[in-house]
Image (cartoon, helix red, strand yellow):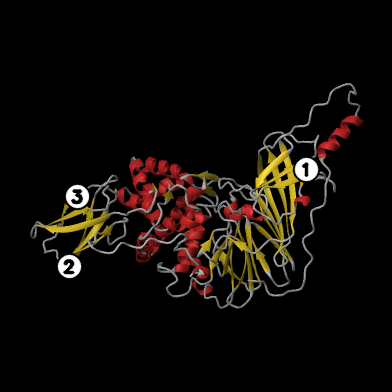
Amino acid sequence: MRPRSSPARPTVRALAPLAARAALAALALAACGADDDATPDAAPTGTAPVRVVRYGHELDVETRAAAVDHALEAQAAGNCVALPSRAANLDLGSVRLSVGLDGGADDGVGTTATWDGATLTACMPAGTGFGPGPLRLRASIPLQPYETWGASQVGYSFTSDGSGQPMFYLVSWVEGCDRFGPCDTSPDTFAHYRFTIHHRSGMRALCPGRVTAGDTTTVCEFDHGGGPTYSTYGFIASPSWQLMPLGDWGGVTVTLHDRPGSGIAPLVDADYHRGFLAWMVSRFGPYPYGDELRIVTGPTYWSGCEHPGNIVLDDGLDRPMSSLYLRPVAHVLNHELAHQWAGDQTTLASTYDFVWKEAMAEYLTFVYEDLTNPVEALATARAWKSFARGAAYFPVPEDEPRPTLLQYYGEVYGPGPMILFRQLETLTSREQVLTAIASVLGRERALSVAEVQAALELTTGLDLDRYFDTWVRGSGAPTWPTFRVEVTGTPPSQSLVVTEVTPGGGLHGCDFAVGISDGAESAKVMIRRGVDGAAVTTVATGVSWAVTTTTLDPDAQCLAYLAAPGAAPVPRHPPGWTPWRGSLAR
């Protein structure tokens, strides 16, 4: 889809050539009377490892001319740097690598750049180099393509909103920032960011950090701790938003940027979300991103996205049947708020640790629902069980070859929170699980699933090796446990016999209730099977009336399903399936 016509804007200026500081330093040594007879030390050579300290990105949203200006920190001496890059349109002749962060107009002259389709390598001229310390890497991209990963919005996209106006969205996601030029795609790294966005008059551009808006240029400066590329490297722009103040949420000024008529604004309960934010602060420490929070709506592929301090919600969440959650807007907004701590400030150690951040955001949203409206929380837990049916991958897939994130990520939203937290709170206690979560959040760090397991073991006292091997990690499509429930004996000495009959054998550790009824009265019986599971569990009903019907797991405490002999297998989800879908994915 092409953007609507608009007044032409000049393309972003190509980066000016700059002279190498190393050469200037050599001239300075000569002027100071260096020994003519001494043999000068050879300039360092080789590709040095670097850390990106600050990403600078400039883009005209409609002409799509772009430039990058990144601050690097060399970890060793050398004369070349290499960073992942899939930007096929990057102008290799514009690449400039120079020492220091501020330089003259000619710094970087003589830089040579090569690209092999996956990595950009920039080298200083022969005879020059650098030691450990700051570097500056610049390049121009004459045309940033409208290009996304599959049907998703990962990449740079243009979409018409419900009023026919354009929405521009640049999304990196996990290991995706190299779509826009040289970028360290490691999920476990943090950086600062500066975005300069050129746009038509009347359009607003929003991105993480401090926003300085001009008539046709907006600058975003992100200098907080906890800025992973997957969520921080990006922006969104639209002429449709109207700004609605949502008040002060515990020292955080919150605003909603919503298209009139979207239906979202009336469903944002400021008091409810203010309460959730206060609960998160009380549990996991201060809100990580200063004193501003923007909530932005638009037609999106996902239900929501957790850009730090700049949450994006799908503007179709108000539609009937948009979700299995009881209140989709409230649930998704709290989920993205939880991500400010769990995903953004504390981020992924690797791509295949993706499950913990989504599981944690879902579980924390569920816990607050349970504190304020247990009926809503039960609907959420039941949604998780529904999402889990037909899963094509384990939460941490170990298939060979391993699936891409876009293939499997949707399979974490149901099994993840149920396995990592809901089942364990039923086996132990909610407070023990929340204490484990608190021990790994609240600071800038990268976190693995193994570290989440260790934290849970510490607070619950359980050995979870077998549990994680059974439930979390595996290859192929998981087979969730199925059970047979029988009533034996006569009143008042009846018992429930619960037998795991999962195809293929094996035991799945979890506890859950069984509902019992005689048509007039009802009760629940807790089935304690332990963290390693039990083949058969027999429990007295504790009632004097004759049990005529049973209901397996009415409180959605486990991925436990009733055995249905002869029933057709549940169809497996296709690759890329997700319940976290927005308007563009339906």
Seen from the viewer's position, the closer of residues 176 and 166 is 176
Depicted 34 relative to depicted 442: above or below? above
Who comes first in sequence, dot 3 or dot 1? 1
Who comes first in sequence, dot 3 or dot 2? 2
Say which residue label 1 marks: 98
Q: CA distance from mark 3 to mark 2?
A: 26 Å
Who comes first in sequence, dot 2 or dot 1? 1
Q: Mark 1: which amino acid? A: Ser
Say which residue label 3 marks: 536
Q: Mark 3: which amino acid? A: Val
Could you tell whether 4 is left or right of 502 in the image? right
Dot 3: within a 10 Å radius of its alpha carbon, few (fewer than 14), some, or many (20 or more) residues? Answer: some
Q: CA distance from mark 2 to mark 1?
A: 79 Å
Could you tell whether 515 is left or right of 63 in the image? left
Q: Nearer the viewer, mark 3 or mark 2?
A: 3
**The N terminus appears in which quarter of the rendering?**
bottom right
Whether tag 3 and tag 2 are in contact, CB under 8 A, the answer is no
Q: Mark 2: which amino acid? A: Glu
* Residue 562 image offset from top left, x and y in percent: 25, 60
Say which residue label 2 marks: 521
Q: CA distance from mark 3 to mark 1?
A: 69 Å
Dot 1: within a 10 Å radius of its alpha carbon, few (fewer than 14), some, or many (20 or more) residues? Answer: many
* Residue 282 image offset from top left, x and y in percent: 47, 52
Q: Residue at x 56, y 70 (%)?
A: 299
